[in-house]
Image (tube, rainbow, N blue to C red):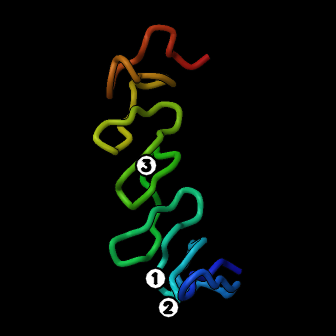
């Protein structure tokens, strides 16, 4: 059961029709906030955030990346092989002391 936003400040608990949705509009098929690892599309549905993305506000708009990826232009790009941190070196590179142990 998810929170459905109603008219005014009224809130009711009803099942959202949009899959992977936490908060939906009164129509129940238009999502406002998706479950973890999912982002809201322009049409109000939920899709996975993307490869390497730890959290996103909307589909294709990553806020934070998982280890082994670096955030660039709201996308998570992969570091070099066996590297966990490339925030300084950038995609395909590896920071000093950034290798996996």
Q: CA distance from mark 1 to mark 2?
A: 6 Å
What is the secondary structure assignment of the residue under circle 3? loop
Q: CA distance from mark 2 to mark 3?
A: 30 Å
- Using residue 25 as the reference point, say whether residue 11 is left or right of it: right
Q: Nearer the viewer, residue 73 or 26?
A: 26
- Which residue extends farthest top? 96
**Location of residue 62 in the rendering, given as x and y in whole percent from the top left corner:** 41, 48
Q: Nearer the viewer, residue 35 or 10?
A: 10
Q: Nearer the viewer, residue 93 or 11?
A: 11
Image height of 67 relative to 95, above or below: below
Q: On the image, numbered disc 1 is attached to which residue?
A: 30
For residue 27, the mark is 2
- Using residue 40 as the reference point, say whether residue 74 is left or right of it: left
- Which residue extends farthest bottom? 27
Q: Which residue sits at x=49%, y=87%?
A: 29
CB under 8 Å between discs 1 and 2: yes
Using a 10 Å C-alpha cutoff, classify the residue at mark 3 as few (fewer than 14 neighbours), some (14 to 19) or many (20 or more): some
Q: Earlier in the sequence, mark 2 or mark 3?
A: 2
CB under 8 Å between discs 2 and 3: no
Image height of 4 relative to 60, above or below: below
Q: On the rendered image, what quadrant is the C terminus found in? A: top right
Using a 10 Å C-alpha cutoff, classify the residue at mark 2 as few (fewer than 14 neighbours), some (14 to 19) or many (20 or more): few
Q: Which residue sits at x=52%, y=38%?
A: 66
What is the secondary structure assignment of the residue under circle 2? loop
What is the secondary structure assignment of the residue under circle 1? loop
Q: On the image, numbered disc 3 is attached to which residue?
A: 51
């Amino acid at each position: 059961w998810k929170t459905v936003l109603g008219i005014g400040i009224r809130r009711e608990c009803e099942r959202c029709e949009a899959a992977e949705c936490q908060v939906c509009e009164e129509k129940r098929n238009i999502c406002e906030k998706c479950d973890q690892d999912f982002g809201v599309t322009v049409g109000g549905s939920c899709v996975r955030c993307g490869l390497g993305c730890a959290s996103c506000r909307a589909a294709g708009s990553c806020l934070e990346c998982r280890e082994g990826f670096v955030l660039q232009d709201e996308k998570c790009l992969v570091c070099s092989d066996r590297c966990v941190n490339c925030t300084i070196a950038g995609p395909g590179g590896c920071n000093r002391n950034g290798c996996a142990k």
